């Protein structure tokens, strides 16, 4: 069984920083792209950033220059969030495209972690 688990959310003041972590575990043959999405109340889930197996990154315009996605050990992905703004408040979800052992490649989502930016 494959699991994707996030950690690191919380409450932070505007201008502050947070680091989100995500780890995939289980019977995994290969992980392709990994990324972070977020969903604010009343809004659709949107891409924040993603990263390929070769380290190529892609960011939403709203976070460019403030957020950095990185990948470690092929099964972990991080999101360093600096200069946080109230509009960054959302539930952040980790996403991984995984080829499980004995299965077919598909996307897996974490359970989400709340990020609240408020004074």
Image (cartoon, helix red, strand yellow):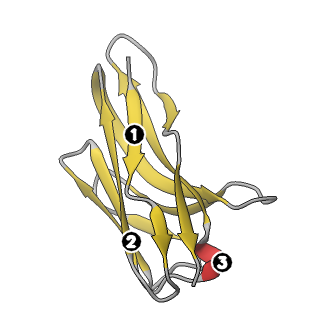
Q: Position of residue 109 (x, y in %)?
A: 52, 38
Q: Which mark is residue 18?
A: 2
Q: Secondary structure at mark 3?
A: helix
Q: In the visual, does 82 lie left or right of 91?
A: left
Q: Position of residue 118 (x, y in %)?
A: 59, 79
Image quadrant where residue 18 sits: bottom left
Label 2 packing within 10 angstroms: few (<14), some (14-19), many (20+): some
The answer to whether residue 46 is above or below residue 82 is above
Circles 2 and 3: CB atoms closer than 8 Å: no
Residue for badge 1: 5
What residue is drawn where x is 37% and y is 54%? 52
Q: Position of residue 46 (x, y in %)?
A: 65, 59
Q: Is residue 80 visible?
A: no
Residue extending furthest left?
Answer: 73
Give the spatial CA distance, label 1 vs label 3: 24 Å
Q: Secondary structure at mark 1?
A: strand
Residue extending furthest top?
Answer: 102
Image quadrant where residue 100 sits: top left
Label 1 packing within 10 angstroms: few (<14), some (14-19), many (20+): some
The answer to whether residue 86 is above or below residue 49 is below
Residue for badge 3: 87
Residue extending furthest right?
Answer: 42
Quadrant in which the C terminus appears: bottom right
Q: Earlier in the sequence, mark 2 or mark 3?
A: 2
What residue is drawn where x is 35% and y is 10%? 102
Front residue of 8 and 23: 8
Quadrant in which the N terminus appears: top left
Number of residue marks: 3
Give the spatial CA distance, label 2 vs label 3: 14 Å
Q: Secondary structure at mark 2?
A: strand
Q: Earlier in the sequence, mark 1 or mark 3?
A: 1
Residue extending furthest front?
Answer: 119
């Amino acid at each position: 069984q494959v699991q994707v688990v996030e950690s690191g959310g919380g409450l932070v003041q505007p201008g502050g920083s947070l680091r989100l972590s995500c780890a995939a575990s289980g019977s995994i043959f290969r992980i392709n792209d990994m990324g972070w999405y977020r969903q604010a109340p009343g809004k659709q889930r949107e891409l924040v950033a993603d990263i390929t197996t070769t380290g190529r990154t892609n960011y939403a315009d709203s976070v460019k220059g403030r957020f950095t996605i990185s990948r470690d050990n092929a099964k972990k992905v991080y999101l360093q969030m600096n200069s946080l703004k109230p509009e960054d408040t959302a539930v952040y979800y980790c996403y991984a495209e995984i080829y499980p052992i004995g299965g077919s490649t598909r996307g897996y989502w974490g359970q989400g972690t709340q990020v609240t930016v408020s004074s």
